[in-house]
Image: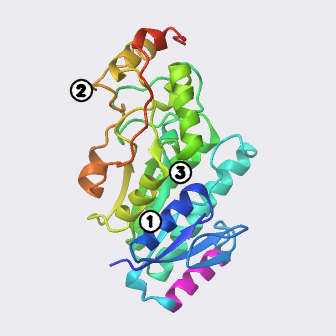
Amino acid sequence: MIRHVIVTGAGGRIGSAVVRELRDHGIRTTGLVVEGTSPADDTLLGDAGDPRAVDRAITHALDHSPVAEVGIAHLAAIPSPGEGLAEEVFGNNTAATFAVLEAAGRAGIGRAVIASSVSVLGFAWGSADLRPHYLPMDEQHPVLAEDPYALSKWVDECTTVMMHRRWGTTIVALRLPFVADGERLAARQREAAADPAALRAELWGWLHTDDAGRAFRLALTAPTSRATTITVTAPESLSDVPTADLLRTYLPDVPTREELPDRTVPYDLTRAREILGFTARRRLVRSTPITASESLQKGTT
């Protein structure tokens, strides 16, 4: 049973939520942050891409807990392609994931969860004419990355598979959508209402920060013993427009493999339900819904 988790990026928006979720369930946490503080029981300063910093965090955890009870939640990353040079985004993210999983395997840590992204598929920051091959989007969909962030997440997922072969570590890569709460989430909801086309590339997906924390906790104890990629989003879309209307208007050429009633998000969440036992609990607070025709008149590009 996991009783102590090393959390990289523990001071970030999602990392802090992961720490709070773990602590609320009696799990000790050691945070690794580049600067500042975190809500972890113990916080160490260091870059997750620096093997020595990762080793220090692991040594600290193992000084307090047996290795069989220690897991890793890796969230430290540059979160978008616009927050650095392409080489920096790709290099930082992939080096950190490799360093963390290599150190974990070498230390004998048997469980790790990493933050991947639905952006791995390439649509969020890809060219405007890039389209899914089918919907709902699942983990088998081809990766069509055109930006360094998406590519970094694809390499991260490949790294989990290699590290499982190399060390036998059980690793879950969680593909996260837009994650937020409070005013940041409310602003995104207003954006979706004002112009549904603006969020087409992300398929109107989202997840409350608290649910992201819970997904990480469940992934640390999931009944799997391999490297697994799992999409976790809220089951409803950000838009007030029924999903079928959205797809007919903004993605009319993309085949759908199953019905998506009401505001069902166009992601396949089967793995999240079956492997993690996860369904997001937090829902949107919706104002008086606008009609489909009113919203869809905002644009069809």
Q: In the shown orientation, is residue 76 left or right of residue 19?
A: right
What secondary structure predominates along the stretch shown in magenta?
A: helix
Q: Residues within 10 Å of mark 1 (few under 14, many from 20)?
A: many
**Tag 3 secondary structure:** helix
The answer to whether residue 60 is magenta is: yes
Residue 206 picture location, percent across and down: 46, 40
Q: Nearer the viewer, residue 288 or 41?
A: 288
Q: Position of residue 93 (x, y in %)?
A: 62, 55
- The earlier-in-sequence mark between 3 and 2 is 3
| Magenta-drawn segment | 52-63
Mark 3 residue type: Val
Residue 155: image tag: 3
Which structural element holds mark 1? Answer: helix
Q: Position of residue 129 (x, y in %)?
A: 54, 18
At x 43% / y 85%, what residue is drawn?
A: 67
Mark nearer the viewer, 2 or 1 = 1
Residue indicated by mark 1: 21
N-terminal-most mark, 2 or 1: 1
The dot on residue 90 is none
Residue lying furthest right: 85
Q: How many marks on residues?
A: 3
Q: Give the CA separation, mark 2 to mark 1.
A: 34 Å
Query: What residue appears at the point 60 percent right and 32 percent down from the top-left corner?
Result: 125
In the figure, is residue 290 to the left or right of 226?
A: right
Q: Which residue is mark 2?
A: 258
